[in-house]
Amino acid sequence: MSNEFVLAVEDLTVSFDGFKAVDSLNLYVEKNELRVIIGPNGAGKTTVLDLICGKTKATGGSIKFNGIELTKLPEYKIVQAGVGRKFQTPSIYENLSVFENLEISFPRGRSVFGSLMFKRTQDVTDRVVEIAETIFLADQLNEQAGLLSHGQKQWLEIGMLLIQDPELMMLDEPVAGMSVSEREKTAELLNKISHGRSVIVIEHDMEFVKRIAHKVTVLHQGKLLAEGNMDAVQNNPKVIEVYLGH
């Protein structure tokens, strides 16, 4: 069964001091699917991403990515398998140019030392330019990354993941703190990058969710509360109760 899914999370549980932050969760993500996970604060959303990328170890259950069990793997092996994760705060090299940030992230130069050693070949340059166009930063390639706007920094970090060509990308609140026009462009960007890969997004902004989600998963107290398209989820009495009850 799990062969059809890029990601198959089954009976996933993690306890912190007896508190179940994630409680018997099942989650199945298909190829080229853009899934959004929503839920009130403390629902376990970020913890789920932490578990998938190996930052937090599961207490029980299974996380299969293309049939590979991730719960036993160290973080770097999970990255090598094709899982990319962007955290809430952008971690870019502020004093390097946009070009250099993307170049350092190119798979041949994962470490700073590695990227100093490898020659800037045409394939790297072409890929950097292509990614820069995708993330709306083609005109900023030589600009220092620290001078970018907040939204542009978020795009750069998405680009740093994209250049590694992960098969599953996970983004935690990508539009937090963005202007309206930046949000619109980010929706366009996420719709674009879900062609050819699966994307999981955690988001609070419901207008934004409507524009990108193929399917929405609602978490509440570490459990799966509801799942489906945005309309179905928004009209679900359990979901309305949880959101309005807060």
Image: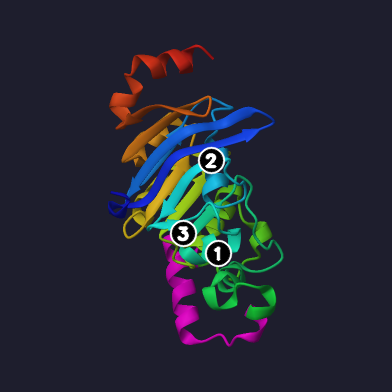
Judged by its main secondary structure, the magenta piece is: helix
Q: Nearer the viewer, residue 45 or 140?
A: 45
Callout 1–callout 3 Cβ contact below 8 Å? no
> Residue 238 placed where, x, y %?
39, 16
Mark 1 neighbour class, 10 Å CA radius: few under 14, some 14 to 19, many 20 or more:
some
Q: Is residue 131 left or right of residue 87?
A: left
Q: Nearer the viewer, mark 2 or mark 3?
A: 2
Q: Earlier in the sequence, mark 1 or mark 2?
A: 2
Considering the numbered disc 2 on the image, is that residue within a helix, a strand or a loop? strand
Q: Report the residue marked by disc 2.
A: 60
Q: Which residue is mark 1?
A: 77
Q: Amino acid at mark 1?
A: Lys
Dot 3, crowdedness within 10 Å: few (<14), some or many (≥20)? Answer: many
**Mark 3 sits on what residue?**
135
Residue at point 48% right, 36% down?
203
N-terminal of the pair, mark 2 or mark 3, is: 2
What residue type is disc 3 on? Ile
How packed is label 2: few (under 14 Cα within 10 Å), some, or many (20 or more)? some
Residue 195 lies left or right of residue 38; in this view the side is: left
Label 3: which secondary element: loop
**Residue 123 belongs to magenta span:** yes
* Residue in the picture at 58% in, 37% down: 14
